[in-house]
Image: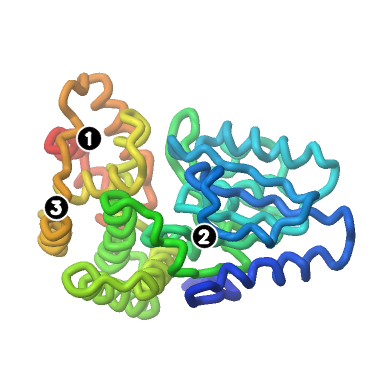
Amino acid sequence: MKNSKMVLYYYLGRGSLSQLKGLLDGKRGGKSDAFAVVVIDHYFDGKNLFSTDFLEHQDLVIYADTTEEPKTSYIDELTDLVKERGQLPVAVVGIGGGSTLDIAKAISVMLTNPGKSVKYQGWDLVKNPPVYKIGVPTIAGTGAEFTRTAVLTGPEKKLGINSDHSVFDQVILDADLLKTVPTDQFIYTAMDCFVHNEESLLGRINDAMTIALAEKSLDMMKEIFLGEMDHEKLLVASSLGGQAVANSSVGICHPLSYGLSIVLGLHHGFSICVAFNQLEEYYPNVKVFKEILKKYNIVLPRVMEGVTEEQLDIMAEATLKNEKPLSNAFGDDWKNIFTKEKVKDLLRKM
């Protein structure tokens, strides 16, 4: 039995980004030195793809480099940059994909908690309430706008700051922001949600609420990708999938993808697709996933060509460090079921 936290408020609708100014003005309270930290995906730097009239001159705008998955060292660097202002911001806003949203969540947490971010990689390690934060996804599928996780790559592992304190206080779901996403990236990211649902439904850590959210999200994903595309409906499916996985846990696919990301530097959505494509023995909807890839002419390359045995070992070790997800998938005896050799066999197929 658990006491589950979800996002308190959300705007949904085309053009809803216009509500951000009012939200921030309310937090500023008329104080001339009150500033917000606005983390924007570097993809948008200089492109004027959306209005920034919510900004005030004193705000700190960070165009976050999402070329690679966010590292704990990068979070520490950005947190120190904010602290140079000498006072806490009234809000941290994240505008972008999953990496950008996770960066915003992590900064919000680290501004009020001592030490380095690597210290908080794990479950429920954050003690102090964070800075108020707003999430604005510009791509659908990660569920980062609704999860309690800020996924970070540390020196030894890829593992999130998993805490109720990581949950956004406010989310803005504006389908107009999705129109800039290239097709392949659009699919890779959306399939992250598809996999969240599959892992939530087939794991041990779920309940009637989790199942309801994941089943509905999965049904919507199938309608959208095998039928008619609807960006607003996709944002809703992503949100439901994010809530489902936040209320349960990921399973086999995500730990495998973490090994790929750490060693090969693959982006999360792409590495999820590469891993899920080889998991038909565990997940029945891999067949549907392959139908979707075929419909959108997405061909996944082999990524393990040229990988050394040493690199393969590192990937397997990184996978097996994710004890909670693997216990969710296999039960308490997971170490005797999902062995290092089994992990390496799966990786070799990718």
For disc 2, the marked residue is: 148
Horizontal relation, residue 90 to residue 102: left or right: right
Specify the amino acid type for callout 3.
Answer: Asn
Mark 3 crowdedness (10 Å alpha carbons): few <14, some 14-19, many ≥20: few
Q: What amino acid does circle 1 point to?
A: Lys
* Separation of marks 3 and 1 at Cα, in angstroms: 33 Å
Sequence-first tag of 3 and 1: 3
> Looking at the image, is mark 1 or mark 2 earlier in the sequence?
2
Marks 3, 1: nearer the viewer? 3
Residue 233: image quadrant is: bottom left
- x and y, in percent, of residue 4 in the image: 52, 71
How many C-alpha atoms fall within 10 Å of the one at disc 1: few (<14), some, or many (≥20)? Answer: some
Residue 42 can be seen, yes or no: yes
Residue occupying the point 67% across, 46% down:
61
Do callouts 3 and 2 mark residues in contact (Cβ within 8 Å)? no
The tag earlier along the polypeptide, 3 or 2, is: 2
Q: Which residue is mark 1?
A: 340
Q: Which mark is residue 297?
A: 3
Where disc 2 sits, the SS reads loop
Distance CA(mark 1)–CA(mark 2): 29 Å
Specify the quadrant that holds the C terminus.
Answer: top left
Q: Residue at x 39, y 52 (%)?
A: 324
Is 130 drawn above or below residue 210 in the view shown?
Answer: above
Q: Secondary structure at mark 3?
A: loop
Label number found at residue 207: none
